[in-house]
Amino acid sequence: MINKLERKFGRYAIKGLMKYLMLLYGLGLLLAFISPEFYDNWLALDIEMTFGHFQLWRLVTFLIQPIEYSNIFFVLIAMYLYYFIGNMLEMKWGSFRFNLFYFAGVIFNILACVVVYLALWILFGKGWSIPVSLEYINFAMMLAFAVEFGEVQFLLFFLIPIKVKYIAIFSVAMYGYEFVRILINDNWQTFLYCLAPFIIGIAHFLIYWIASRKSRRARHRTIGDMRRRYAYMQGIRMGEREGGVVNQAGTHKVITKHRCAVCGRTELDDDMLEFRFCSKCEGNYEYCMDHLYTHTHVVRESTGANYTGDDKSL
């Protein structure tokens, strides 16, 4: 199913999604500094205000959340960590699958907020919105990263190396402890109110993970594969920016799709150039139309000397 969706809508995927999400984090940090109340009054996902008063922008603006800035250093560390995790997942899965994973989490949170509001309204005659935040979306993203890159190590307190999979297990255990404490010290309504977003985060991760298990097996990539792919794509982008072949000074290299084996011209030199492979050359030699019929054919040493082909029967 995901493969079909990618073939149909893959071109619409946002590449480098984490860059734009970091802008939302930055806006949240600025909002916390200027006026945190503005978020609750106008931006937060409140079901009654969203659908009852047609403030539909809240379905999107709830992602711009005030961030605690008591220690700006740890805020910046957290932003970098999520940026790193998101980029690694995008490199592993591809832009479309990472977009689908993240925005599915957003939609799950909105739907859960609506369902909980209606359930409370039916049971108690008054509904209220659960606190939908980026916390559990990021939590699901961290779980996905832990499964994909469980052996990657982070430096805890910049000193202690610890594998990501153990961080994920510890995080789940801490959430469990917190929910048990709430259940003991508060009533069950408060417990369910706090538990719902956590369940959403776990369900978001599990649903996507199960739905994409076949495509993950077919698209398995190691970190080394990802680095080589990244280097290749960087070369392609450099070629699109700079054009041509290696310049006279040799200051840059360009990766292109086509290159004439005689004159060295590529599709970046002239959009009207056409390229063909020669069937008589031993090897993958490609030529522009100016040299396709006039080049020297490449043959093995054992079969004799090379010969010049003015032969048009290619």
Image (cartoon, rainbow, N blue to C red):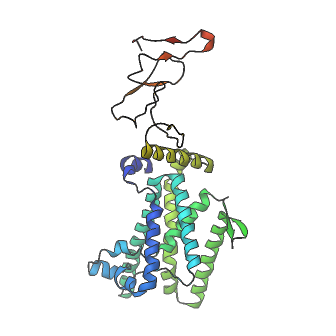
Seen in the picture, residue 16 relative to 242 is either above or below; the reply is: below
Is 148 in front, or is 115? 148
Q: Position of residue 50 (x, y in %)?
A: 31, 78
Which residue is depicted at the point 50% across and 46% down?
233
- In the displayed structure, does residue 159 sit left or right of residue 90? right
Seen in the picture, residue 178 relative to 86 is either above or below; the reply is: below
- Kindly indicate the quadrant of the structure image that contains residue 275: top left
- The answer to whether any part of residue 127 appears in the image is no
Which residue is depicted at the point 50% across and 66% down?
203
Total of numbered circles in the picture?
A: 0
- Kindly indicate the quadrant of the structure image that contains residue 153: bottom right
Seen in the picture, residue 269 relative to 241 is either above or below; the reply is: above
- The answer to whether any part of residue 14 appears in the image is yes
Is 4 in front, or is 67? 67
- Farthest residue, direction right: 160
Which residue is depicted at the point 48% across and 82% down?
193
Is 151 in front, or is 195? 151
- Kindly indicate the quadrant of the structure image that contains residue 314: top left
Seen in the picture, residue 87 relative to 271 is either above or below; the reply is: below
- Farthest residue, direction front: 249
Which residue is depicted at the point 38% across and 87% down?
124
Q: Position of residue 11 (x, y in %)?
A: 38, 50
Q: Position of residue 267 (x, y in %)?
A: 40, 35
